[in-house]
Image: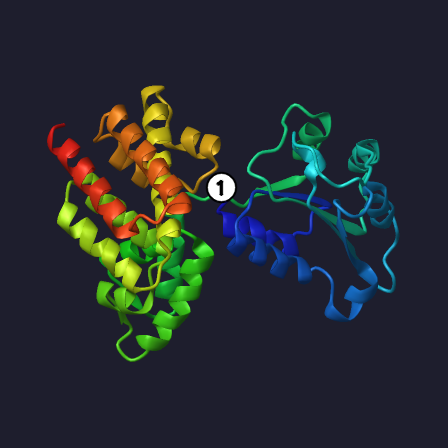
Amino acid sequence: MALIDKIKTIATKQDPVYLITGKNDYWENEVMQQIKRIIPEEEQTMNFATYDMEETPLSVAINDALSVPFFGEKRLVLIKNAYFLTGSKSKSKVKYNVDELEQYLDNPSSETVLIILAPYDKLDGRKKIVKKLKNKSTTITLNDFSERETADFVRKQVHDRGYEMSPDAMNELYARTLGDLGKMMNELQKIFIYCNDSKNIDVDVVDKLVSKSLDQNVFALVNYVVNGQTTQAIQFYSQLLEQKQEPIQINAILESQFRLLLQVKILIQHSYSQSMMTNTLKIHPYRIKLAMQSAQRFPLNYLRDAYLQLVQIECKLKSSTDNPELLFEMFAIKLGQKKNSI
């Protein structure tokens, strides 16, 4: 069943216990919309309770789940930040007793819908409570959504609104939002208004309406550098400075990009797949995909030297009065020369 269909069943099927894992702002918002439909609006004050596990003991939420609804058919109990399902330690001093939750799962209230939000990339599968929850609940994983599924979902939304979108426009929208579904849907609202007459969305429309973030501009800068396009790289860097971007911030993102390329290169050599890299590095799959495409073209020492040069530039930017533009020019020239010798 598609993710959107699973989410829609929350309001219609109303299983006794739901476990919502992963982090995706768009789908999390969809989940909350479906949750609110379980209890009529006039009954929500008495029959809808939310408990943050970093502020409230688990036992309080379980006791509420065992309570009967007030003047209604259903009671909804929402548990947020269920960090006790992970292997990490919380800074919160709130104590919890998972035995109470285990007992509840054996005999959940038929009058309550218990929803547990665990907005984490991974739960600790070794824990008894995690195993039991997955066995006794309806589990929905919000970040279990591939690049293709994201693009297909957006295309459907476009089609359902009566618009046409070219493949190039879709690719550009995906690239400029780094595959963030929430951002894509937000940008589409502007695009729909702009293209209301023609109903046709092309790449020029996306280019005109969807701005590039500093990260994306720096990603373009990285492409110029690694492809040996030194002149273009230097000109683009100057444009970023003219846009009042801070040199140290540009360098920090450059450093981050080359660090990622270096990490991906090492993981490729250890036969990691794209999904394995995503889980290991905790980075969006689309960024991993782009990094894999770039990293495979260069030897490890080339990426390592580039990264170390950027670390040195960072130190100079913080401790000297050296001209930032000149520092970048020297970096781009050296890397361009080394690229030509590969």
Q: Report the residue marked by disc 1.
A: 144
Horizontal side of 239 relative to 231 (left or right) equals: right
Residue at 18% in and 36% down: 334
In the picture, residue 20 is in which quadrant? top right
Give the mark count: 1
Residue 151 appears in the rendering:
no
Crowding at mark 1 (Cα within 10 Å: few <14, some 14-19, many 20+): few
Residue at 85% in and 50% down: 64
Nearest the eye: 328 or 144: 328
The answer to whether residue 138 is above or below residue 159 is above
Residue at 28% in and 56% down: 172
In the picture, residue 198 is in which quadrant? bottom left
Residue 241: where, in percent of width, then height?
30, 59
Horizontal side of 111 relative to 158 (left or right) equals: right
Quarter of the picture holding the C terminus: top left
Q: Secondary structure at mark 1?
A: loop
